[in-house]
Image: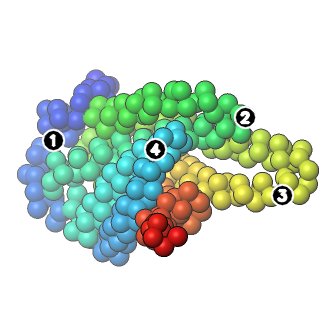
Amino acid sequence: SNMTMVSQWLPMWTWTSMPEYNCSRVRPVGEAWTIARGVQHPYFGYWSILWGVMTELFYIPCIYALYLERRKSCYRIMLWLAIDDIIALASNSIAFGFILVEGSVFCSRPWFFWIVGCFGLGSWCGACFGCLLLVTFRLFEVMNLSKRFEATANYLIVIATCYVIYFTFLTPPVFPSSEFKAMFYDPFIGDVPPEVYVNWPQIANNYLVVLTSATLYILLVIIVVTKQGAMASEDGRSRMSASAPIFIQASLICFCNVTAAMEYNYMNFFPTPPFVIELGQISWQLTHGMPPFIYLLLNKTVKRNLRSLIAPKRQVSPSKL
């Protein structure tokens, strides 16, 4: 329909002129909507706030450690992803949690929901694109082609930033719903078909980018196992042991990405049990919140840089030599 096409391509700041987002045709914007349609979920809300705040705090030392390695393209991508995750957690965990605790809905305060939804959607798509860059770099690395990737890394990061800007400002957002404990394209005003609000570019992102990343991660594991299996057995085992943290890190993030992407695509079109909807939202939160814990536990470079920050090596004065 014409309404669908308009909502797909106009920038976010024109939303007040779109009839499909006009709450006042049903009832006045404000507290009346919270009373009529909102549902409080304090437990899930407080979990979301706690998870968001905790992961943001753990990200601070990780960003410092990643910044020290910024000359390497792999770590520049990881630093870019960390900033993207911080924006996402502010939206899909902290702001989302406050909305659940309060029990408000889109028409309670449309501008706030619009901002939360736009930045949540944009940062999710950015994380998908960033993970695709990261696994591509790993593939180039194991095939001894990393220098070719290094030459274009900065341009790819600029493209990834433009990708985020496009989804944040030029496509319809997802809105938090206190009633269903997740975020949906539909603001649930009540008199417009849900398909009017669907963000088709984001649907394509979820299928193409996320599934491509998952496929490339599997390919990466196969290549590494094949190459190391061809080595002397002892040497191959030692290299595999050293690579294990990378595979664990990749597998955990990739699993959460695929789970969140597929569940969000499904629940925005089909009736879905409440626990599956909650699982989809938690998977999305974990996608952005797990990396700092993975870095602190498994990434040797991050741990080394943080140890040097906490306990810097003492310089021995010449008089004591």
**Pair 1/4: label in front:** 4
Residue at image mark 1: 22
> Which mark is drawn over residue 129?
none
> Which mark is drawn over residue 237?
3
- Find the distance from the CA under tag 2 to the CA under tag 4: 22 Å
Q: Is residue 310 visible?
A: yes
Question: Do callouts 1 and 3 mark residues in contact (Cβ within 8 Å)?
Answer: no
Residue type at mark 3 is Arg
Which corner quadrant of the image does residue 143 belong to?
A: top right
Residue 220 image offset from top left, x and y in percent: 71, 42
The first of marks 1 and 4 along the sequence is 1
Residue type at mark 4 is Arg
The first of marks 3 and 2 along the sequence is 2
- Find the distance from the CA under tag 1 to the CA under tag 4: 46 Å
The first of marks 2 and 4 along the sequence is 4
Residue at image mark 2: 143
**Residue beneath the point at 61% across and 36% down:** 136
